[in-house]
Amino acid sequence: MEAGVARYLQYPTWIESESFGRKPTGSLRFGRRLWEDQKVRVVVSAHFPVQASSSRNRSVSFEVSCSSYKNFSASTLESGSFRAPYDEALMLKNKSQEIEPYLNGHSVYLVGLMGSGKTTVGKILSHVLSYSFVDSDALIEQEVNGMSVAEIFKLHGESFFRKKESEVLRGLSSKKQLVVSTGGGAVVRDQNWDYMQKKGISVWLDVPLEALAQRIAAVGTHSRPLLHHEPGDPYTKALKRLSYLLEQRGKNYAKANARVSLEEIAGKLGYAHVSDLTPTEIAIEALEQIEGYLKQEGGMAIAGL
């Protein structure tokens, strides 16, 4: 962290002279605009002890010396605080290393409604954990001669698809070091939970319905067999169908060993909307929730670890 902040501030930084002064506590604000008649060149050279707060928002205390510029006398300011941008990739790597002894090679199964980001987040997790990524829908398509999920639903029906889905999950249940992105409806069959939690950890990506509907509407509903035939504009029919599906499956999703709420992440990080979250931030939270589950009493035994 200290090295990261040092790198971030190693070059001269321009700030507005009116933005700072001698303060025993408080924050040193770096202005976005440059006022030609008031700007001061600040050279930062100090030790960077990390203070308080959460793992994603660090306050760093430091001293700065100000060179004289346009009649502004040189001085040394007392400690202030600087909100340093955190390195997502580094945090992700560190968290994966922390969780590794607890996870012990067991697979991670991501569940959630369509469009919740299981594939995107799953690929990030598989990379940082050095696991293999598997999309259960893609495996089903391979087994049905490369036919798409939408085509399988149309030609063979949902019951045929759900049967194939269970067969795929059963085959995956005996393997380790996988991150599996499951289909949105995989949670409806009890036997699928047996497969996922036999030697794995299940994680629910809980995304607000409005955000899901916006994502799906943006790319279209043609690849979503449970949405394509709903009436109305893409957003309206997506929101309507998703609301129904969550009502039907909500209790099933809640069976997951860990829950990743995008609303809660956005709140912790101070974002106005879940759409401001990056996939890496969601992946970090997933690892934190998995770690919390495995550390809790009986968690490792329940997961078969």
Image: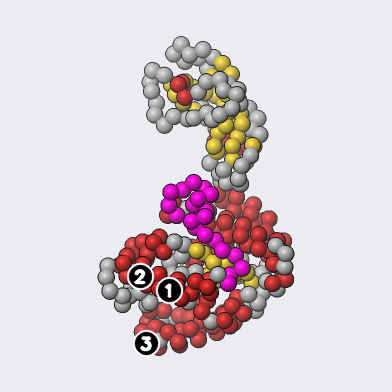
**Label 3, label 2: how many angstroms apart (C-alpha)?**
25 Å
Q: For marks 3 and 1, give the CA distance.
A: 22 Å
- The residue beneath circle 1 is 245
- Magenta span of residues: 255-274
Identity of the amino acid at label 1?
Answer: Leu
Compared with 292, 22 (above or below) is: above
Q: Earlier in the sequence, mark 3 or mark 2?
A: 3
Identify whether 81 is placed above or below 69: below
Residue 207: x and y in percent read: 46, 62
User: Dot 1, crowdedness within 10 Å: few (<14), some or many (≥20)?
Assistant: some
On the image, which quarter does residue 115 sit in? bottom left
Q: Is residue 271 magenta?
A: yes
The quarter holding residue 133 reads bottom right
Residue 262 position within the rendered picture, expressed as x and y whole percent measured from the top left: 49, 58
Q: Amino acid at mark 2?
A: Lys
How far across and how far down the image is residue 63, in percent?
60, 25
* Quadrant of the snapshot with the N terminus: top right
Q: Secondary structure at mark 2?
A: helix
Give the label, 3 or 1, closer to the camera: 1
Residue drawn at 61 percent across, 46 percent down: 55
Crowdedness near tag 3: few (<14), some (14–19) or many (≥20) residues, C-alpha within 10 Å: few
Q: Which residue is mark 2?
A: 240
The stretch drawn in magenta includes residue 201: no
- What residue is disc 3 on? 155
Q: Residue at x 39, y 83 (%)?
A: 153
- Please tell me which residue is depicted at 64% across the width and 52% down the height of the picture: 94
Image quadrant in which the C terminus is located: bottom right
Secondary structure under badge 1? helix
Which residue is located at x 48 percent, y 81 percent? 140
Q: Earlier in the sequence, mark 1 or mark 2?
A: 2
Question: Where residue 54 appears, x then y in whole percent?
Answer: 60, 45
